[in-house]
């Protein structure tokens, strides 16, 4: 855990770099927001201000999910209500662990202990924590049922369960099945196949540790003169941290260069889509980064299978061809074509397909796609006005990052309190999210973006007056040293 003395040294280094880039501490804090400013300056002004404006609204609030989004929401509500009645239902004793740090664990920069936290240490005072799992949702009767058989009623419900890692959707990984990122039983089952023979995944904490072991073996083989191949496929579904696979290929590249063994390694990146990023400026920047690092990029390749024994990843290459001409429409029918591609590997990092928990997807509060359907700006359920959702499980575009949750929980709290008070909702989420894209050990491109207010897609939303598509040491300092304390001690207190 970073000490206050170490944190002050880090802040001094960041200050010095910001000064070189023409950014003052005051401007930086304005960009980061009041919560982050209060955190970095060691004050409680944000909490004090919130308490002074506390609402007298009353109602029993149940939050399903006690991870980052759920606990931050509970803390903000506790700070914002004069007489709060808040219950968090969460089974995992380490649910608040810092998942964005798993890439740094996987590359040998951090240890598992650097990202693990006890939920009890961050559960807000006065909030009732039920250490159980919700298995049934009954929104028509305003109640949920837990795995132990308890029925819990509510006036208002917040769903922040996160998502499930669907390893079983990849042929060859059926035995791994569904995995919750911090579930120890799931991790033990996954480690029977993943974390050995070059096949690995950072998407659960123990998997990140195993990934570092596999990465070291891969680099050692290349350093010994062996010609090795790395395979980095993205899944075909929405997934947490859209930049994760790009970070992994860049970190492997960095470790190979460090060992002076890059020439012996072939790195192959596969994506199901037709671009490396949904925002054109970031797509172009990442394309140039991949080209500079001699990474082979393959578009329109769906990751469908892995053969751990023979160390082969299987992808379905797909494209469109003209079919028969339709006389009535005056156009050709487009026919989808596919080709099976087998990619041999010595190191293969797997990002699994991801989905909503079955308890959510198969309930009245779920949707055909599983995710909780909400109005994307207000985060209120489209059918049940006393239900809100945020984080990975909410059906909003671009939303599956900690950066999204940091913006969303403030919107949920403001709109929930307005609903409790019988007032119109005024807070609106603009789709902001951030991907601190690690481009090497020492540089990061801080890809911030939000929904395009003038049409479909997304647009850059930089917090700093710098070119957001540039790799910078300053952004590395923020990613590697400041984002964790800002998240763990700022967001989980409802202040950042």
Image (spheres, grey):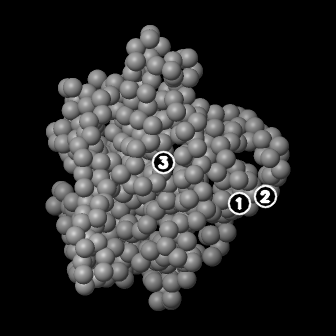
- Quadrant where the N terminus sits is top right
* Left or right, residue 413 beside residue 231: right
Q: Earlier in the sequence, mark 2 or mark 3?
A: 2
Residue sitting at x 64%, y 51%: 469
Q: Residues within 10 Å of mark 2 (few under 14, many from 20)?
A: some
Measured in 3D between alpha carbons, the distance from the residue under mark 2 to the one under mark 3, in whole angstroms, is: 27 Å
Q: Is residue 82 left or right of residue 10?
A: left
Point 48% across, 29% down: residue: 252
Q: Secondary structure under badge 3?
A: loop
Q: How many marks?
A: 3
Residue 428 quadrant: bottom right
Residue 243 numbered mark, or none: 3
Q: Position of residue 150 (x, y in %)?
A: 20, 63
| Residue at the spot of label 1 | 31
Please tell me whether residue 481 is drawn above or below residue 355 in the rendered image: above
Q: Residues within 10 Å of mark 1 (few under 14, many from 20)?
A: some
Judge depth for marks 1 and 3 and give the one in front: 3
- Position of 228 with respect to 18 (left or right) is left
Q: Does residue 475 show up?
A: no
Separation (CA) of disc 1 from disc 2:
6 Å
Q: Nearer the viewer, residue 118 or 368?
A: 368
Whether residue 215 is visible to the viewer of this picture, yes or no, is yes
Residue depicted at 36% across the width and 77% down the height: 381
Q: Position of residue 226 (x, y in %)?
A: 40, 14
**Where is residue 9 drawn, in percent x and y?**
73, 35
Badges 1 and 3: C-beta atoms under 8 Å apart?
no
Give the residue number, with chain letter if any, for mark 2.
27
Whether the residues at callouts 1 and 2 have beta carbons within 8 Å, the answer is yes
Q: Residues within 10 Å of mark 3 (few under 14, many from 20)?
A: some
Distance between mark 1 and mark 3 Cα atoms? 23 Å
């Amino acid at each position: 855990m970073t000490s206050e003395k170490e944190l002050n040294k880090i802040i001094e280094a960041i200050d010095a770099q910001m000064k070189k880039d023409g950014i003052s501490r005051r401007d930086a804090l304005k960009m980061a927001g009041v919560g982050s400013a209060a955190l970095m300056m060691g004050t409680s002004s944000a909490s004090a201000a919130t308490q002074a404006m506390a609402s007298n609204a009353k109602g029993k609030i149940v939050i399903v999910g006690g991870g980052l989004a759920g606990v931050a929401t509970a803390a903000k509500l506790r700070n914002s209500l004069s007489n709060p009645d808040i219950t968090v239902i969460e089974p995992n004793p380490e649910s608040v662990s810092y998942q964005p740090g798993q890439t740094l664990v996987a590359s040998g920069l951090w240890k598992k202990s650097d990202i693990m936290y006890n939920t009890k240490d961050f559960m807000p005072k006065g909030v009732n924590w039920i250490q159980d799992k919700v298995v049934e949702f009954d929104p028509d009767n305003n109640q949920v049922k837990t795995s132990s058989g308890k029925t819990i009623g509510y006036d208002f419900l917040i769903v922040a369960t996160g998502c499930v890692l669907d390893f079983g959707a990849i042929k060859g990984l059926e035995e791994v099945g569904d995995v919750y990122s911090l579930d120890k039983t799931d991790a033990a089952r996954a480690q029977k196949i993943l974390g050995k023979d070059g096949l690995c995944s950072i998407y659960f904490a123990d998997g990140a540790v195993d990934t570092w072991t596999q990465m070291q073996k891969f680099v050692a083989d290349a350093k010994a003169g062996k010609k090795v191949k790395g395979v980095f496929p993205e899944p075909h579904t929405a997934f947490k941290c859209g930049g994760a696979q790009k970070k992994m290929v860049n970190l492997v590249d960095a470790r190979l260069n460090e060992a002076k063994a890059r020439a012996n390694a072939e790195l192959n990146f596969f994506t199901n889509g037709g671009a490396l990023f949904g925002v054109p400026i970031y797509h172009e920047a990442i394309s140039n980064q991949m080209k500079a690092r001699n990474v082979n990029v393959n578009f329109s390749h769906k990751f469908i299978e892995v053969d751990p024994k023979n160390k082969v990843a299987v992808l379905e290459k797909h494209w469109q061809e003209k079919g028969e001409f339709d006389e009535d429409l005056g156009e050709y029918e487009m026919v989808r074509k596919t080709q099976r591609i087998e990619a041999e590997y010595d190191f293969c990092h797997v990002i699994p397909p991801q989905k909503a928990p079955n308890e959510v997807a198969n309930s009245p509060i779920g949707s055909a796609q599983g995710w909780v359907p909400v109005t994307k700006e207000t985060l209120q359920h489209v059918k049940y006005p006393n239900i809100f959702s945020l984080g990975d499980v909410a059906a909003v575009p671009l939303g599956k990052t900690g950066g999204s949750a940091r913006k969303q929980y403030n919107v949920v709290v403001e709109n929930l309190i307005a609903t409790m008070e019988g007032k119109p909702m005024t807070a609106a989420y603009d789709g902001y999210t951030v991907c601190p894209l690690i481009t090497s050990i020492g540089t990061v491109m801080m890809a911030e973006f939000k929904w395009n207010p003038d049409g479909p897609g997304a647009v850059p939303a930089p917090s700093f007056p710098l070119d957001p598509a540039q790799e910078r040491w300053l952004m590395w300092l923020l990613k590697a040293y400041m984002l964790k304390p800002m998240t763990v001690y700022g967001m989980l207190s409802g202040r950042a």
